[in-house]
Image (spheres, coloured by chain):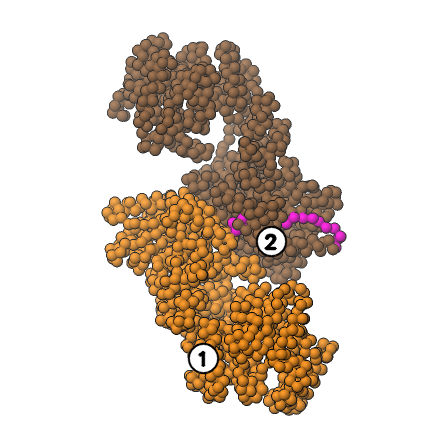
Chain colours: A brown, B orange
């Protein structure tokens, strides 16, 4: 094992900022500040390798550690000028965790270590404050006993309360030195009583105990949960920082505070922070006292009477401000710093990249690039693409408290409030009256599309991140929460129960699809504002990226949104979404019920003008840009009613025989519709559907070109193919239709025919398929379903557990499963390119809008991704970052 | 283009037996007989390349052909000693098709070509029989006009009937020369009337017309259908044989016949055939006259009074017998020959490998190998493994006519008859009374297992070759017909209708799972007899094969059958099949309804002894051989009732709350169960199920070993894995259970843990998985479903059309899709071997019993296949053939 302890002191350090993996964030920051000459209390960091050893060896410390620890303590004594057993000025240290990623408050800390029955007196003498010394000692006993010895915290709290009662004292501040001395005695009795041993007096023994306790706290329950929530691997481990204590609570010339080098909420370039006079760091966090602003400017903005640090301790303020600027310039990023002032002397305790809101991140990155502090590429790498969602959707105002009823999956971002409705018809009816509704369903089906469109947001009790509700909602840019925990919907009663409350039709709720929260009542929203920085950053992203970005869109509203958000075409227009409205669904059902090709043709003839109009509008909106139209994909039973009541209703409405309708629905029903009679299989069986759709496309293109003056860029995509032969069958029909239209009108549309690659076999046969297909678009949703054998609609029962147990690194419907699905995509790309070097390769699954997946697609070298309109900016930025990452 | 016409005459030929692709079967056989010096009427063969040209060039003949045809005719004239325009002895020829594979009667033939108004007289003079000459001429006009000119056959038949009526003649034999002359005139009038031109008199023109007509007949409807049924590629094309006519109908010293060199029904070594005196080949086929036996022995066996050829024409018989022996020895196979005797002179017209029954094929192959005519390897290559099915199952007696109601898919071979029942309970009840029943269902589900077991055979209206009914029936070795065309089952009425008839509960039907036929009433069966030759051939196969063969079996009956048929272990025991019977299903349902792990454990504790008994019996039966037990696989909802009535019934029976039962069933219901919460996912979520199954396995193994004295060879297989992590989770539980049992009993079972590879991702990650798995077994059923995105239960709607349209070469659930699924299997094998060189690789999908797939598995190098017990002999033979093919 290499070096275990890394020393640091103002002016020099064994470690550096680059050693975050080994030293943790806090340790690396302390070392870097020390190197920069900033006043850092001297100390040393035990590496994360020690932590790894600790867990690999039954929670024991490496045998070499003892020697290194002694050396580090000796060194620390030399630097500090005193040691644990110094009779005049005993060394006191803090022992703090510090992982690679910040996990605030999740692990344990021990302060004031080194105090015992002897050193407490020396401390009292040295600082001339006996009350302070015994207060420190009792705090130490309390902290050490609970963290290291496992004595419950409340034992000490109760003892203190009883003591105060006996003395009729209300506030801690009224306790004198003697009181604290008495409390120390009480505390030591508690330890002896509970542990059967005396409170440890040997500082070395105290230190080893504290180190082991801090390492142990890496695996405490809340740390594990935090890591799971933040995707922090358990094997990273934490470092431990041992550092000379400095006291912000020594007197009124002492203080402690935190500050950001820029405003983390808005991104404005101003020192932003808070401090407390005569307090320890914990007090700032605890919120018992109201902290004061750091700068005068901030104080004035906050209209506070409490004096600022700038006013109270001008020299300290100036020094700190200079350090903040130095650190920001050095790290080339906004810093989040902790400091303590001990009797007028400023000590820097921590620096790290500051967390910030999405708008702040954007402003800071663009500002810093404009200031010349970072490059434009750096600026792009600073913005988490996913965070742009916050800029594009309304959000629940985070500054207002609200009653969260439950949480589900954040399936489609944005927030909205409205009256609860339980059915698509009601949603449409109420929306038609101008009322805002939230559609609550156990889960949605294609028949709900109209209602989803009419609703402000969608809430479901089941389904996953890529269930029907989620996919459709994202496509529409509507907030959606799926799989809301504990939500029980009772359609008959037109109500749902959650968290012990019952909500009825018409009750107001708020759905926050960004956080997954469901809130009672209507909550105040923040409207998104697209700032100038947004456009600037997007411009930089467009200059940096190689991948083209298209949108999945089929409605004029979606297509317009896509253009607004910078889509370079439509990568997927799902024609079936056009089949559900009004008289169309009647014609579709007539087509399905027809007994012969002629009957189907008659029904399709009714659909033709409607489809033509749809496509014409799409071509017009996207004039000059490619539009990829996917031929009919879903199994036909999705268009038929299923329950007896619905069948009766539909049969009456369309003048059909209910028994025939029921029989056909039964015939078409499937055990596994996902793997059933759909996609190209429909076109092979019922080529007249292909004929109608091709005709609608070509006629629409001709009409749109006449309108816009630009030829429509037609791409016809055949879904679910797994062989060249299937595609050939469809291509022949499309070509024949094109020829027929040319014969009728004398006008020839140029068009491309391609295949949607969404089955494992299709990726393997991509070479053959590309002999016919001019483009291939990977439908990674279905490819994920088939490659992993997971139905996205049914995955709720186990997928969460799979991700939690580490079987899968992430939800494969959100981020592409590189080891499985990804390899098939790579195989498909390679084989297709070999067969047709200029084949266009795209991705039109949900993954097309996921930054991590886009990284992978950049690596594989696909030509474009296509995602829902609201994810287009995210994809543009992610594509730029992927290109930079690959370059760099 | 190379040579187009290949000449042959007794003693020499341009072609040979090896040139079947170019000359077709008949042409190659004629050439070979000519080379062997057999008396073959001289002639020439136009190659299949001419046919290919014909279809590639709009049904025109190659320009070079005219010259080659002239040369061939000149040569033929020289050899025969006369030509088309010989005034004394005009040349007459036959023009016959002859494709690479025999397609009897599917294409057209023209006989007596060369006759016209002049040559008919010359013929009459030459043979001294005017009646014969004009009969030939009118036959020629009739044949030529219908085949070449497209005049409907019935025109001629009607004209002849009218002529006979006018003359008050009943039999053709009563017509004299003048009558036939008059008929010729009538026939020519018909041609002139319908075609507007005279019947062609120029023999050269006649010949070109006939050649084109025969080529054209390659694409007639019945030929196309025949090719589809027999998997003959359309691009093979046919050859055309032009040959000097010989007449078996010239007088009573003439004859025509067909014969096999061995008995094609039994395989006995005896000349077997029929002939007719004074007849043309057509007359034998037409069945108007009863043919006579060739040999005296056969005549005596048949108890026929009609004299044999041996008796009638002893010299001809001796000559023919010698030729038959010569040809069989030469071809080293049983021959099917055609001959004609013209005025006492024997002519050989055809020889080809003879079709034979499965028992005959077996006997002939073994006999020939024992005779030294062929090698044992040859013998193995002579037997189509699929044909063994006929030897293992009862078959409908083919010699008895019966009323076929409908046909479906031959889903599980064998035939059985019984009373119709419509539900599993009735099936069990009636079977319990000793009655034989046929279970008729729309489709079966796991709940029907008990009824399927009780039934003699299963009949379903839906489903495919690999639907639930098919798979389970094959596993049980029970006849099954699925997707019976036009079968409409009415459960309420307890009846079905088919072919316009209604059958009620209790009516007798016969189901033939080998042919797919459903027959009204009880039909006489042939019981299978396993002959000595069967055992001999199997022994040779075992010596030749590399692949091990195991069986898929879980019941004692199946396991015993597996051993009887030579299985080398159980490759797949599906534990869930054991979960449906009696009190088990109650315990299973209690387990599913339990709210906690403890509740599940309590229910599982009830299952433990039953599972243990099951496994113990399996281990005992398979003592000394490996037994692969698959952990619970199906989605849990398969074990719950679904309809309200069933739910109420079950709830009452198990004392559960119906609403809770309904709720749980709804919770567990899935959109795509195939891709749902099943397989290893169950074990990850409910590890207590794994614990129980592992305990049952180990305790059973210990008990069985105590009984048999041999340690059980345990292989525990985890289904549906796609990652090493999943397998690790399960392995840990199994290992812990093994350790616990060792601690309890002091006995340690050795066991192997492996994974079922049935998802595309699993094949890609096989390297990782093999780090934990000691064996991998490819579950090619589900791998096919996921790789192709085809649900086998729903494939009926399109899969047939896909195979018919050539999108897929064969049903991928029957024969492995090499280009898709096969590549994934190959990838999986390669990666697994790389990670763990001694990993055992098996296949346990249906493909494990399919000869074509076994060929592929031999190539990929898997170690064993596992199939249903009744397919084990097939797999043994197929494995031997695959090994020989690879070696050769």
* Left or right: where B475 falls relative to B141: left
What crowding class fits label 1: few (fewer than 14 Cα within 10 Å), some (14-19), or many (20 or more)? many
> Does the segment drawn in magenta span residue A746?
yes
**Quadrant of the rendered image containing residue A624:** top right
Residue at 32% x, 10% y: name it.
A88
Judged from the image, the secondary structure of the residue bearing numbered disc 1 is loop
| Magenta extent | A744-763
The answer to which of A413 and B189 lies nearer the viewer is B189
What crowding class fits label 2: few (fewer than 14 Cα within 10 Å), some (14-19), or many (20 or more)? many
Rendering coords of residue A101 (x, y %):
45, 28
Residue A679 visible? The answer is no
Task: Tell me whether circle 1 and circle 2 mark residues in contact (CB < 8 Å).
Answer: no
Residue B571 visible? The answer is yes
* Residue A206 to residue B717: above or below: above
**Quadrant of the rendered image containing residue B578:** bottom left
Residue at 26% x, 21% y: name it.
A198
Please give the count of numbered marks on the rendered protein: 2
> Does the segment drawn in magenta span residue B717?
no
- Can you tell which of label 1 and label 2 is closer to the viewer? 1
Instruction: Identify the image quadrant of the C terminus of chain A.
Output: top right
Rendering coords of residue B881 (x, y %):
43, 62
Residue at 54% x, 70% y: name it.
B16
Instruction: Identify the image quadrant of the N terminus of chain A.
Output: top left
* Residue B403 to residue B648: above or below: below
**Label 1 to label 2, Cα distance in Å?**
54 Å
* Badge number at residue A727: 2
The answer to which of B400 and A178 lies nearer the viewer is B400
On the image, numbered disc 1 is attached to which residue? Answer: B271
| Subunit that carries the residue with mark 1 | B
Residue at 61% x, 91% y: name it.
B174
| Subunit that carries the residue with mark 2 | A
Rendering coords of residue B760 (x, y %):
47, 49
């Amino acid at each position: 094992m290499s070096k275990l302890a890394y020393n640091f002191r103002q002016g020099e350090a064994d470690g550096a900022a680059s050693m975050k993996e080994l030293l943790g964030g806090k340790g690396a920051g302390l070392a870097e500040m020390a190197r920069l000459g900033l006043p850092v209390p001297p100390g040393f960091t035990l590496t994360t390798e020690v932590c790894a050893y600790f867990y690999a060896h039954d929670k024991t410390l490496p045998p070499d550690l003892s020697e290194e620890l002694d050396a580090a303590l000796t060194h620390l004594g030399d630097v500090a000028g005193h040691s644990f057993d110094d009779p005049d000025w005993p060394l006191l240290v803090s022992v703090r965790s510090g992982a690679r990623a910040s996990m605030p408050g999740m692990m344990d800390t021990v302060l004031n270590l080194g105090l015992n029955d002897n050193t407490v007196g020396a401390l009292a003498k040295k600082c001339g404050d006996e009350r302070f010394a015994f207060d420190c000692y009792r705090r130490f006993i309390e902290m050490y006993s609970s963290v290291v010895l496992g004595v419950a915290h409340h034992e000490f709290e109760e003892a203190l309360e009883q003591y105060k009662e006996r003395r009729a004292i209300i506030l801690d501040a009224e306790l004198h030195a003697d009181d604290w001395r008495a409390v120390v005695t009480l505390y030591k009795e508690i330890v002896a009583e509970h542990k059967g041993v005396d409170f440890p007096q040997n500082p070395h023994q105290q230190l080893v105990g504290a180190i082991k306790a801090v390492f142990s706290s890496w695996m405490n329950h809340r740390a594990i949960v935090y890591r799971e929530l933040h995707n922090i691997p358990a094997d990273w481990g934490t470092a431990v920082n041992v550092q000379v204590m400095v006291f912000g609570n020594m007197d009124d010339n002492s203080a402690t505070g935190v500050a950001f080098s820029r405003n983390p909420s808005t991104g404005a370039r101003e020192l932003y922070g808070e401090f407390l006079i005569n307090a320890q760091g914990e007090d700032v966090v605890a919120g018992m006292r109201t902290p004061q602003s750091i700068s005068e400017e901030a104080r004035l903005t906050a209209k506070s009477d409490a004096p600022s640090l700038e006013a109270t301790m001008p020299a300290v303020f100036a020094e700190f401000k200079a350090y903040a600027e130095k650190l920001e310039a050095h790290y080339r990023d906004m810093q989040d710093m902790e400091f303590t002032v001990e009797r007028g002397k400023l000590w820097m305790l921590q620096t790290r990249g500051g967390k910030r809101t999405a708008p702040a991140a954007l402003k800071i990155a663009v500002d810093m690039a404009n200031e010349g502090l970072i490059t434009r590429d750096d600026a792009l790498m600073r913005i988490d693409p996913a965070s742009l969602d916050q800029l594009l959707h309304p959000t629940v105002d985070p500054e207002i408290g609200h009653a969260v009823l439950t949480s589900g999956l954040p399936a489609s971002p944005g927030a909205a409030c409205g009256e609860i409705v339980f059915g698509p018809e009601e949603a449409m009816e109420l929306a038609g009256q101008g009322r805002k509704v939230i559609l609550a369903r156990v889960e949605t089906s294609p028949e709900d599309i109209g209602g989803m469109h009419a609703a402000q947001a969608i809430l479901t009790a089941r389904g996953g991140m890529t269930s029907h509700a989620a996919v459709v909602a994202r496509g529409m840019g509507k907030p959606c929460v799926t799989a809301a925990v504990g939500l029980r919907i009772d359609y008959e009663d037109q109500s749902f129960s959650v968290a012990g409350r019952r909500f009825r039709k018409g009750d107001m709720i708020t759905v926050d699809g960004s956080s997954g929260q469901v809130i009672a009542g209507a909550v105040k929203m923040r409207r998104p504002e697209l700032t100038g920085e947004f456009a600037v950053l997007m411009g930089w992203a467009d200059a940096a990226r190689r991948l083209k970005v298209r949108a999945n869109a089929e409605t004029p509203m979606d297509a317009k949104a896509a253009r607004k958000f910078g889509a370079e075409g439509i990568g997927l227009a799902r024609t079936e979404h056009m089949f559900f409205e009004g008289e169309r669904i009647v014609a579709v059902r007539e087509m399905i019920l027809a007994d012969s090709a002629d009957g189907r043709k008659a029904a399709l003839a009714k659909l033709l003008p409607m489809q033509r109009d749809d496509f014409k509008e799409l071509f017009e909106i996207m004039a000059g840009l490619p539009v990829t139209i996917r031929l009919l994909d879903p199994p036909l039973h999705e268009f038929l009613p299923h329950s007896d009541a619905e069948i009766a209703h539909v049969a009456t409405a369309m003048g059909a025989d209910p028994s025939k309708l029921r029989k056909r629905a039964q015939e078409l029903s499937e055990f596994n519709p996902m793997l059933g009679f759909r996609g190209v299989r429909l076109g092979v069986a019922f080529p007249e559907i292909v004929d109608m759709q091709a005709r609608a496309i070509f006629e629409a293109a001709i009409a749109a070109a006449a309108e816009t003056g630009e030829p429509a860029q037609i791409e016809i995509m055949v879904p679910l193919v797994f062989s060249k032969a299937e595609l050939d069958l469809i291509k022949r029909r499309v070509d024949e239709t094109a020829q027929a239209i040319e014969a009728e009108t004398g006008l020839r549309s140029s068009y491309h025919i391609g295949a949607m690659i969404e089955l494992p076999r299709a990726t393997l046969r991509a070479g053959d398929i590309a002999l016919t297909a001019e483009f291939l678009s990977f439908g990674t949703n279905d490819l994920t379903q088939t490659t992993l054998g997971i139905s996205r609609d049914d995955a709720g029962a186990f997928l969460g557990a799979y991700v939690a147990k580490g079987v899968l690194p992430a939800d494969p419907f959100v981020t592409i499963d590189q080891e499985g699905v990804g390899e098939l995509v790579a195989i498909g790309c390679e084989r297709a390119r070999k067969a047709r070097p200029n084949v266009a390769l795209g991705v039109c699954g949900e993954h097309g809008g996921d930054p991590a997946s886009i990284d992978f697609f950049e690596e594989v070298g696909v030509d474009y991704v296509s995602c829902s309109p609201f994810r287009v900016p995210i994809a543009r930025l992610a594509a730029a970052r992927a290109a930079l990452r690959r370059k760099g």
